[in-house]
Structures are given as structure tokens and as C-alpha cells.
């Protein structure tokens, strides 16, 4: 007779249910695992055999076959150890079969029977809730999985605890959600002296999730400004926190089950590969663009990134999701992020300073920033120059606004957008509005429309650029507390669009 239990296989952020079947039949002693299992899953038989031996449980001298159904779905990872052990224990009548059939489990077994934490407990718990089954996982994964709340989660430290739980000797208490991690102290915007225009661009970018490029000489404060964006962004909503945490769970980045309400801030180095940025590699894992979902992706020294890597950002920026296609995997990851980029004006960095510029000036600026293609630049809403700060200004006391003050205005603008798009599924901020919806919410007054048409004709704005100016103008109006987009709002949006136009 076949014993059954359940686990999951991951396809992107989706956890697909896998039925683990175990049959013990007469024949030559053997232990085989079938069902398109990878090397880590195939090795589970040795870990399971050793873990059972540590509990003084001897496998019968029969033919043991474990099937992972559906058989055409690739199975990867060590989290299949625990469900295979449960199915085997049910097949040899050590635990009740009906209890195994109502359980979704995942976890890696050590040779002495301890349960080792694995990635993906949060999406696994959601899959268990949809199937109306309980979840069994390692103790370290319990606080993370318990955040789902719609299904009981039992977290065990070892296979011995699992046995005592299923046999009624020592039932395991349901796990409780892990404490939400407190946000680390963010750097204050008040620390940045001068750069008022760049600070304003940061505020607009944060309010409407508009992509931003800062260009300036070395030491002008570009990275310093970018590092202060988390301090002006509103906390994640419950829905956003769950979306972000599912991706981080698959990547194994959740610490002790804690789910943070702080928006992610990712800053990959310019030597990062394409798979590291957009996702891929073995198992089609999420990349930096997905790990920055609902948060910030900071790309310092933007022209130094390889050209193919930069070009792969075009589709994720536009669609808000990335598709990782491989021979044995085709998965989608969400990636609605705020891209903040920084660049020097040229290779030497001092294009605007005749005393320090290199001999190739001014042509070096065109060559250096020319690495950024026109289609990529067309997707960047805000472009701002960050000039060097005079030494005399560095000794002056800080007089600018604090991050808390700017954050209050950003939060108010985000609240307006939440109400505006409450009946628009998939749209949360102005940067995501398009088509008829954009024309409805961002239609400028007569003077503003005339200005925008003149700019479009004079500077040859593309259709994408035209619509992105409208989105930025809508955000500027929200920060201004205006229900209508007016000429000053359009003028400010256009000014950020045309900055660096001669250079780029």
C-alpha cells in the first residue's frame, strides 16, 4: 500500500504542491527516488537512512520506492528530506498515514536526525493554507512560516520530535510569528549640506517611485544622498511586506523568521553578473532587481556596469517583473523597484573643472556617458547634476530639512496615490499609471499642456518620455497638495527631464 504526504517545489515565488508517494514492496532491498529529482534530492535517501538509524529505526529489507508527483516537474533542493522521511515512516506504519496525508512539510535532515533550516518556508506555508493542510518545518523556519496565519505551523528541531508529535507522545505547540525586525537607524538627510536640487529630486523620486540618475564629480555627495533614501520612504504596507518577504524567503535572507516593514535597499557592485542582477543561475534564483521589489535598487558608477547587464534592465523597469527563461525553468519574479543611479560625468570625473580635467576633455564625457543607451535613459524620469560643494560650505551648520520632515510629505503623497488607485489593481504609485488612467489623473491645465507640447516638439521627446513627464508632474502636484496638474508642476517635471540633455 502506498503512503502519501506533501511538500512543495518552487517556481519563482510560486510554491507548487508535490505529492510524495512511498511504496514498500517485496523484492531485492533497494531505496530509489524517482520523479525528476536533482542531485540534492537523490542524495536524500542516504540522509534519511542515516537519520532513521540514529533513532534506532531499521529500514525493512524490501524494495522502497519514493515517487515525487507530478513526475515532469523539476525537483531541486534539500528541503525534500523531511517529506520523504515522513512518507517512509507512514509506509512502515510508524506514524499514522492519515496524519501524513494532511501535512505539507519541508526541511533538510542531518545525519543525526536534526532538522536544518531551508529557504522558502513562507511561500510553502501559503501553499499549505491554500490546500487546507498543516505545515511541518524546521524550528528555525517556524517564526517565518507562522506569519501566514491561515494554517497551523509546527516547527521541530529534530526528526525525533516529529515522531513524538505524530505518535501523540509530545505534541508540538504551533509556532508563533517572529518579531518584526526594528528598522536600523537611517542616515539623516540633514547631514547633506547644499545640494538642494538633488534633495528635491530624491523627494519626488520617493513620492512617486520615479527612477533617478545623479551625475557629478567624485565626492560631490551622490552616494551620500542615495544612502538617505530609506529614511524618507514610507514603511511597507502589510501586502507589500508579504510580497517582499516571499522573495527574500526564497533567497534565504529572512533572519530568524523576522519580517521587516522597512523597504529593501540593494546596492550591487558594478562587477555583478547578469544573473546576479536580473536573476538566473542554477534554479533560476531571484536577482537584485527582485530582491529590491518594493524598495530601492542603487546602481553606483552606472556606466561601469557591463552594457548587456544595463540593457537587461529595460524590460523589468517597464513591466515591473522579470522573466527568467532557462532550458529547465521558466519563472517570473516581481521587481517593482525604485532605481537610483549615480555616475561621474566622465572617466576622470572632473569634466566641469578645467584645472583637473584630463587631456581628453570634453570628448571623454560623451564617450563615458555614451555607454548608457538612449532607450535606457528614456526610462529614467529624473536626471540631476550634483555639483561639488565648496569647502567653505562644509564648515557651516546643517540647516536643511531632516529626513523625518521630508518623509512626512512623501507619506502624504503616497497616501493620496493609495486612495487614487484603490480601484485599480496592480497600480499603487504614479509611476505605474498608464494609458487612459494616466490621461485622466495627470491631464495638465491649458498653460501646462501648451508648455509640454512646446518642449516635446523642441527637444524631440519620445512618447515614453512624454508620458513619464506627465507622471512626474502628477507627483509634483501631489507633493504640492494640488488636485490638478498645473504649469509650475509641468515646468519642474520638464526641468528634470532636460537636465544633462546636452551631455547625454
Image: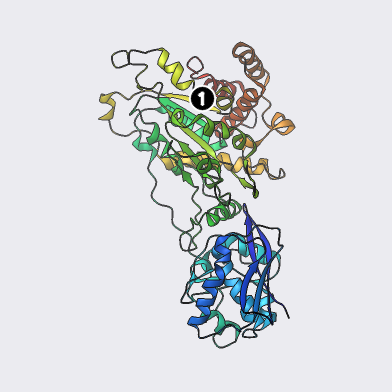
Q: Is residue 247 above or below residue 276?
A: below
- How is the protein colored in the picture? rainbow
Which residue appears farthest toward the bottom when viewing the image?
Answer: 169
Quarter where residue 453 is shown: top right
Quarter where residue 74 is shown: bottom right
Query: In the displayed structure, does residue 286 sit left or right of residue 433?
Result: left
Q: In this view, does 232 lie above or below 128?
A: above
Seen at 61% across and 84% down, the residue is: 60
Q: What element carries label 1?
A: loop
Residue closest to the eye, 194 or 497: 497
Q: Position of residue 307 (x, y in %)?
A: 51, 29
Q: Position of residue 429 (x, y in %)?
A: 61, 39
Residue closest to the eye, 312 or 328: 328
Which residue appears farthest toward the front when viewing the image?
Answer: 28
Q: How crowded is mark 1: few (under 14 residues within 10 Å), some or many (20 or more)?
A: some
Residue of label 1: 372
Q: Position of residue 6 (x, y in %)?
A: 66, 70
Q: Position of residue 441 (x, y in %)?
A: 68, 32
Residue closest to the eye, 311 or 454: 311
Amino acid at each position: 500500500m502506498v503512503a502519501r504526504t506533501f511538500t512543495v517545489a518552487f517556481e519563482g515565488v510560486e510554491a507548487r504542491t508535490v505529492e510524495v508517494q512511498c511504496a514498500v514492496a517485496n523484492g531485492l532491498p533497494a531505496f530509489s527516488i524517482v520523479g525528476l529529482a536533482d542531485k540534492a534530492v537523490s542524495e536524500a535517501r542516504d540522509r534519511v537512512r542515516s537519520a532513521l538509524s540514529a533513532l534506532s529505526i531499521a529500514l525493512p529489507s524490501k524494495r522502497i520506492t519514493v515517487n515525487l508527483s507530478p513526475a515532469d516537474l523539476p525537483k531541486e533542493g534539500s528541503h525534500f528530506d523531511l517529506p520523504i522521511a515522513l512518507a517512509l515512516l507512514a509506509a512502515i506504519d510508524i506514524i499514522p498515514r492519515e496524519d501524513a496525508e494532511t501535512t505539507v512539510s519541508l526541511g533538510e535532515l542531518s545525519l543525526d536526525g536534526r532538522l536544518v533550516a531551508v529557504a522558502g518556508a513562507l511561500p510553502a506555508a501559503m501553499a499549505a493554507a491554500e490546500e487546507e493542510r498543516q505545515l511541518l518545518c524546521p524550528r528555525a523556519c517556524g517564526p517565518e512560516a507562522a506569519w501566514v496565519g491561515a494554517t497551523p505551523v509546527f516547527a521541530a528541531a529534530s526528526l525525533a520530535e516529529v515522531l513524538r508529535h505524530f505518535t501523540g507522545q509530545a505534541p508540538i505547540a504551533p509556532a508563533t510569528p517572529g518579531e518584526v525586525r526594528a528598522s536600523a537607524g537611517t542616515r539623516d538627510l540633514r547631514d547633506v549640506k547644499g545640494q538642494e536640487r538633488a534633495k528635491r529630486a530624491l523627494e519626488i523620486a520617493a513620492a512617486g517611485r520615479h527612477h533617478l540618475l545623479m551625475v557629478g564629480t567624485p565626492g560631490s555627495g551622490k552616494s551620500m544622498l542615495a544612502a538617505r533614501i530609506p529614511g524618507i520612504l514610507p514603511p511597507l504596507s502589510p501586502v507589500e511586506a508579504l510580497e517582499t518577504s516571499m522573495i527574500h524567503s526564497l533567497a534565504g535572507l529572512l533572519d530568524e523568521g523576522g519580517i521587516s516593514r522597512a523597504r529593501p535597499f540593494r546596492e550591487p557592485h558594478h562587477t555583478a553578473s547578469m544573473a546576479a542582477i536580473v536573476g538566473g543561475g542554477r534554479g533560476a534564483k531571484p536577482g537584485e532587481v527582485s530582491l529590491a521589489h518594493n524598495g530601492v535598487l542603487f546602481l553606483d558608477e552606472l556606466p561601469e556596469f557591463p552594457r548587456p547587464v544595463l540593457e537587461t534592465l529595460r524590460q523589468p523597469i517597464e513591466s515591473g517583473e522579470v522573466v527568467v527563461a532557462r532550458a529547465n525553468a521558466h519563472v517570473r519574479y516581481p521587481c517593482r523597484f525604485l532605481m537610483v543611479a549615480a555616475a561621474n560625468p566622465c572617466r576622470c570625473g572632473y569634466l566641469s573643472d578645467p584645472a583637473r580635467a584630463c587631456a581628453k576633455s570634453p570628448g571623454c564625457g560623451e564617450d563615458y556617458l555614451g555607454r548608457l543607451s538612449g532607450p535606457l535613459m528614456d526610462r529614467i524620469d529624473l536626471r540631476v547634476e550634483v555639483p561639488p560643494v565648496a569647502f567653505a560650505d562644509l564648515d557651516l551648520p546643517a540647516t536643511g530639512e531632516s529626513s523625518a520632515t521630508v518623509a512626512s510629505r512623501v507619506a502624504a503623497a503616497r497616501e493620496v496615490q493609495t486612495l487614487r488607485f484603490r480601484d485599480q489593481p496592480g497600480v499603487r504609485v504614479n509611476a505605474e499609471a498608464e494609458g487612459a488612467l494616466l490621461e485622466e489623473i495627470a491631464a495638465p491645465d491649458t498653460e501646462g499642456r501648451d508648455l509640454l507640447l512646446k518642449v516635446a516638439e523642441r527637444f524631440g521627446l519620445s512618447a515614453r518620455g512624454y508620458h513619464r513627464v506627465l507622471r512626474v508632474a502628477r507627483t509634483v502636484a501631489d507633493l504640492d497638495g494640488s488636485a490638478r496638474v498645473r504649469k509650475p508642476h509641468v515646468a519642474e517635471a520638464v526641468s528634470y527631464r532636460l537636465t544633462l540633455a546636452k551631455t547625454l
